[in-house]
Amino acid sequence: QSALTQPASVSGSPGQSITISCTGTSSDVGSYNLVSWYQQHPGKAPKLMIYEGTKRPSGVSNRFSGSKSGNTASLTISGLQAEDEADYYCCSYAGSGTYVFGTGTKVTVL
Amino acid sequence: VQLVESGGGVVQPGRSLRLSCAASTFTFGRYPMHWVRQAPGKGLEWVANINQGGTETYYVDSMKGRFTISRDNSKNTLYLQMNSLRAEDTAVYYCARELSLLPAGSLDVWGQGTTVTVSS
């Protein structure tokens, strides 16, 4: 149950698109379409942004999208806005009823 | 839709603590539930989950045998019993609800978190 690997930081200018990767193994990300993504602002609880790899919960901007290729899932934020500056975490089902989060990525809007 | 955790505090190493998570304005018993923790300045760590009836529970390996997740659907409350606490268990503990009726790690409702500090 090792944490999924994410880049420590990603930055972009307002209006740009950025992509955050989440690399796991064939035992977690690669085996299931059960990757979720969370946004967390400092001192706040996480917020679900993407679930089951590509689905957006009601109320989440369509600027956020998810995808997966092999053992790597990705979150893309298009039209980057100042309010998108936060920490982002991926999470995957890891089999046998368990889940594993990613190491987290700090997104900075320049 | 709201989740409110309680029960955190300062506890000595080796002691026990029970966290509670009170749910309101949704049918608590219909949803799988999870505990997730976050150590100071660190990332999120999945702790455990439980199915709707409380008959199936799963844990991260490092907490198996020390932590127990349970629920009382008549009280709309989720619990986490933590025994033999260690300094490395110091964290904010969140309870969270599954978005759907099937467990998928899609946690759409989170509590505000309760802080546990393990220190002598």
Image (spheres, rainbow, N blue to C red):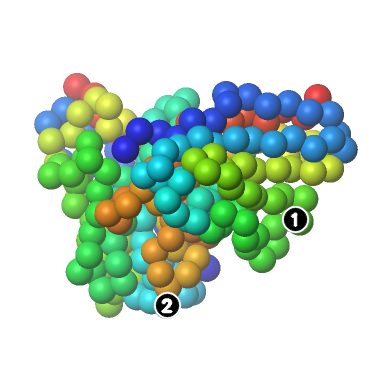
Determine which of the numbered discs, if any, sits on residue B2 in the image: none
Note whether B93 is above or below B32 in the view shown. above
Answer few, some or many: residues within 10 Å of disc 1's Cα (few below 14, many 20 plus, some between 14 and 19). few
Note whether residue A52 is visible.
yes
Which image quadrant: the C terminus of chain A?
Answer: top right
Residue located 25% across and 49% down the image: B59
Note whether residue A90 is visible.
no
Determine which of the numbered discs, if any, sits on residue A61 in the image: 1
Across and down, in percent, residue A68 comes to 58, 47
| Image mark 1: chain | A
Q: Quadrant of residue B65 in the image?
A: top left
In the image: residue B58, left or right of residue B25: left
* Callout 1 secondary element: loop
- At label 1, which amino acid type do we have? Ser
Task: Please state which of residues B2 and B29 is positioned toward the viewer in this rendering.
Answer: B29
Q: Are marks 1 and 2 on the same chain?
A: no
Residue located 73% across and 26% down the image: A11
Across and down, in percent, residue A10 comes to 68, 27
- At label 2, which amino acid type do we have? Thr
Across and down, in percent, residue A30 comes to 46, 46
Residue located 53% across and 51% down the image: A36
* Residue at image mark 2: B27
